[in-house]
Every structure is written in structure tokens, then in C-alpha cells.
Amino acid sequence: MKIHKEGSSIIIIVFGLLALANLFLLQNHVPPVILYTFAGASLIFLLCIVSFFRIPRRVFTFDSQAIIAPADGKIVVIEEVVEEEFLKKPCRQISIFMSPANVHVNRYPCNGEILASVHHDGAKYPAFNPKSSTLNERTSIYMRSDFGAEILFRQVAGAMARRIVNYASVGMQVKQNEEFGFIKFGSRVDIFLPLDMEVCVNLCEPVRGGQTVLAKKTQEI
């Protein structure tokens, strides 16, 4: 298992602060029960931070005619909507809620070209709230897939998230399952697809980024 580059400085800072706090308690001769309890809690907290930034070994799914899950989490939305920002037409929205326990690396769902990559400041609604998709801090990545479909996916910050990292830029030719970003501490990813793609997941189903097929092309688009 590797640690994501976005977490390196945070882990070092947290380790340093916890080490100083434990050293302070030790030097001030606090009762052993308090010292051991705080030390144990510090270790658990540090391990949680390390776990959040983990990149586990994973066998990816590659399918040039499919949309692969861009993130780990649970499907919280599958519905027909009108996407107003880029697609400007009816499409299928699939949303993945990412808890703090999930792997938070985000990956491109298909091969294609980036047509737009935009960051929006916003509110801090919980990521499972439908309002978060359009009102929270978010990035919108608009691309044309190699099989001809124009799709949009958004990184949406939740109530706990404090930074969205997005590596996509206009004109990039990207490959399925390559990293396009990271969201720190709780979040959501929305994917907007053509209505004539076959959805392959169900509501409340757990998915794994880079492995789970969300939808497949059913005809020429």
C-alpha cells in the first residue's frame, strides 16, 4: 500500500504535533492512565489519517466502451436530470458518496479529451445532500470520450472536506483509471452521462474506483 502525495505533509504535521503533545504530558508527570490513554488515542488518530491517504494495490477494469467508477463509495443518486452547466440537456446522473473511510483518489472514468475544467467556490452542505451538487465547493470536468459521448463529472466537497485537488486541464488526452484528483476528508463525485447508456449499478450499491462498471455504451452516440 502506498500513501498519496497529497497526504505526505499532513501526516508529517500531525505526527509532529501529536509527538510534541505526548512529550509535554510525559515531562509534566501526568498520571499514567491519562498518559497512556492520550498516547493510544494519538496512535489511533494518526493511523486514521494515514488510512485516509492510502492507495491500495488494485487490479483495474479497462473497457473502452464503458464508464468506470471514478471513486470508491456508495451510489446515492441514479436519476434523469437536466445538466445546465455544460451538457445543457437531459442526462443520467450517477452520484457516489465517499465517506472518510473510503479511498479518496479520483480516476478518469473513460478515455478521452478534456474540454473544460472549472473550479467553483461554494457552501459546505453534507455530501449526501442533493443541494451539494450545485451549491457546494466543486470542480466540473467536461470531456469527450473516445467512443463519442460527452460526459461531465464533478468533485463535490462535503461538510468535512477542506480541499479539492484537480489535475485536469483543457486539451489533455486522458486514459481510463488515471488519477485526475483527490478530495480531502469526505466528499462526493457526480457523473452525468447520455440517457442512452446502459446503467450497470443500483442505488445504495458500494463501488470501487477503477474497478466497478457504472454504465456501458449501447449504441452509436
Image (cartoon, rainbow, N blue to C red):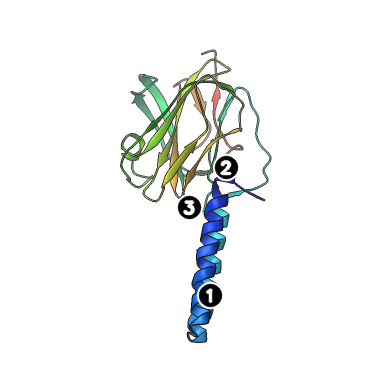
Measured in 3D between alpha carbons, the distance from the residue under mark 3 to the one under mark 1, in whole angstroms, is 29 Å
According to the picture, the residue beneath numbered tag 1 turns out to be 23
Kindly report which numbered mark, 3 or 1, lies closer to the viewer in this rendering: 1
Measured in 3D between alpha carbons, the distance from the residue under mark 3 to the one under mark 2, in whole angstroms, is 14 Å
Under circle 3, the secondary element is: loop
Q: Residue at x 54, y 66 (%)?
A: 44
Checking the image for residue 100, the label placed there is 3
Q: Evaluate whether residue 42 shows in this view.
A: no
Q: Position of residue 195 (x, y in %)?
A: 44, 22
Measured in 3D between alpha carbons, the distance from the residue under mark 1 to the one under mark 2, in whole angstroms, is 40 Å
Under circle 1, the secondary element is: helix
Q: Evaluate whether residue 90 shows in this view.
A: yes
Q: Is residue 129 left or right of residue 46?
A: left
Considering depth in this image, is 180 or 28 the residue closer to the camera?
28
Which of marks 2 and 1 precedes in the sequence? 1
**Disc 3 and disc 1 in contact, CB within 8 angstroms:** no
The quarter of the displayed image where residue 163 is located: top left
